[in-house]
Image (tube, grey):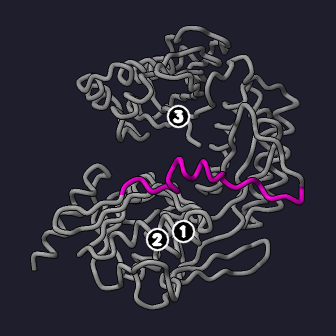
């Protein structure tokens, strides 16, 4: 889940502070927040490198602009459907891709301390979502916040922080901090900001969905991805190839369940077992299952190795993850060089893989510091359109005694995500030449 939030400051803010909020506005208002929105849309929709460069030279951009032209080509740009809420330093809006019916919700807020700083992301809703269907009333706000507070108080992995989060939500609700949010996605964005202010937990978050799937019976587990879905994504494996110099390269964007996808991982790694070195590309990997982390790692060691532990606060128990004694296919082995590529988007189980193998000095990590999410989480419902992800445990590395939560995996060799592959290839050429 992502969301758009831009922070800007403009002169003349005081003049705007007294004006009343506008709702349902069709055009972009001439406020500091509206000016920021207009500048972003003009640059993004132009697909003009000169205009994008001018935008980036004007603003200090904190939200990711990596692959902006690929994203622009995919979306065709954004059409603004409606401004939902407009205040001097706060704006909420609904937009749609020009190339397809995907609808998204955004919120921008104007800061008072830096006229050039902008931060943010996008909040997708789904195709052909009706703008009028997003409204919420006071009773819905209270019910969603009350349920979130109860789940955090009962299930968050740290009882002390869970109670602090719960008390904070109740206090903010009581003093009217959420009264301004008349659209569901806007409330979800605000709740995420408030929770992050206290917990700084990347796995903790509220999401808004126009139509949540039916809730399974209490005795049933949530449905797993279907075989068709896994085949469509090839279990997350996007590319497996032999590069120049007999260097293996594999890119996979998720760590799926071992039962349906272990054979795919085995085929990919066996294909590359005879290469002189291996590059594992996790730059777009959003995480997944620790069991698949252990399976993939098993091909990179010659002997059984302790990778990491997972503490379950609810059961007060620890699960230990080791490489497997035997694997199907052929191992790459434990002696040849392995480079792992990372980006700021590398998350969760993908970070676990990079962190644990880096701690064991089995891999060299090349790229950007990763997102920093080390707490496993489960999802609970907050109503018909809201759900919350609540962390219930913590990863523990047996070498470092800690994890990457909040700090990410720091690469051994820093490079921009776009340059990580070329950097790893250069390092390997130098290494293999000796």
Q: Is residue 318 placed above or below 105 in the rendered structure? A: below
Q: Which residue is disc 1 drawn over? A: 262
Say which quarter of the image contains residue 82.
top right
Q: Is residue 139 placed above or below 297 in the rendered structure? A: above
Q: What's the residue at 63%, 12% (across, down)?
A: 19
The kind of secondary structure element at disc 2 is: helix
Observer-nearest of 40 and 422:
422
* In contact (CB < 8 Å): disc 2 and disc 1: yes
Percent across and percent down for residue 151 are: 82, 55
The kind of secondary structure element at disc 3 is: loop
Q: Is residue 182 placed above or below 338 in the rendered structure? A: above
Q: Which residue is disc 3 drawn over? A: 122
The region drawn magenta spans 218-239
Is residue 400 shown to the viewer in this render? Answer: yes
Q: Which residue is disc 2 drawn over? A: 266
* In contact (CB < 8 Å): disc 1 and disc 3: no
Observer-nearest of 125 and 303:
303
Percent across and percent down for residue 401 are: 54, 82
Per the rendering, the mark at residue 52 is none
Quadrant containing the N terminus in the rendered view? top right
Neighbour class for label 3 at 10 Å: few (<14), some, many (≥20)? some
Q: CA distance from mark 1 to mark 3?
A: 33 Å
């Amino acid at each position: 889940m992502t969301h758009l939030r831009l922070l800007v400051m403009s002169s003349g803010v005081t003049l705007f502070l007294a004006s009343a909020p506008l709702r349902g506005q069709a055009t972009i208002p001439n406020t500091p927040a509206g000016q920021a929105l207009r500048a972003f849309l003009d640059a993004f929709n132009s697909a003009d490198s000169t205009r994008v460069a001018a935008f980036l030279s004007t603003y200090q951009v904190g939200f990711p602009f990596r692959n902006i032209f690929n994203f622009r080509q995919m979306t065709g740009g954004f059409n603004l459907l409606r401004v939902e809420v407009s205040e001097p330093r706060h704006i909420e809006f609904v937009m749609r891709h020009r190339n397809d019916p995907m609808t998204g919700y955004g919120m921008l807020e104007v800061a008072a301390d830096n006229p050039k700083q902008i931060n943010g992301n996008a909040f997708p809703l789904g195709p052909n979502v009706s703008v009028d269907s997003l409204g919420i009333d006071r009773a819905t706000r209270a019910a969603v916040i009350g349920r979130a507070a109860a789940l955090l108080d009962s299930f968050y992995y740290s009882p002390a922080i869970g109670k602090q989060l719960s008390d904070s939500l109740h206090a903010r609700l009581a003093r009217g901090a959420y009264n301004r949010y008349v659209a569901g996605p806007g409330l979800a964005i605000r709740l995420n900001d408030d929770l992050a202010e206290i917990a700084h937990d990347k796995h903790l978050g509220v999401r808004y969905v126009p139509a949540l799937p039916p809730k399974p019976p209490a005795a049933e587990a949530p449905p797993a991805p279907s075989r068709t879905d896994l085949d469509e994504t090839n279990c997350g494996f996007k590319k497996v190839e032999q590069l120049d110099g007999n260097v293996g390269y594999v890119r996979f964007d998720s760590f799926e369940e071992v039962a349906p996808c272990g054979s795919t991982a085995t085929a990919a790694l066996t294909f590359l077992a005879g290469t002189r070195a291996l590059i594992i590309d996790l730059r777009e990997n959003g995480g997944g299952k620790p069991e698949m982390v252990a399976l993939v790692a098993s091909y990179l060691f010659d002997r059984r190795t302790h990778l990491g532990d997972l503490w379950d606060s609810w059961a007060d128990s620890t699960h230990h993850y080791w490489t497997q004694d035997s694997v199907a296919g052929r191992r790459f082995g434990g002696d040849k060089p392995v480079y792992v590529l990372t980006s700021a988007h590398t998350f969760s189980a993908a970070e676990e893989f990079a962190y644990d193998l880096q701690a064991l000095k089995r891999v060299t990590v090349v790229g950007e510091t990763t997102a920093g999410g080390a707490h496993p989480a489960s999802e609970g419902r907050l109503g018909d359109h809201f759900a919350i992800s609540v962390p219930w445990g913590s990863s523990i590395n047996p070498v470092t005694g800690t994890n990457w939560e909040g700090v990410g995996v720091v690469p051994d060799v820093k490079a921009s995500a776009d340059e990580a592959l070329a950097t790893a290839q250069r390092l390997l050429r130098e290494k293999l030449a000796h």
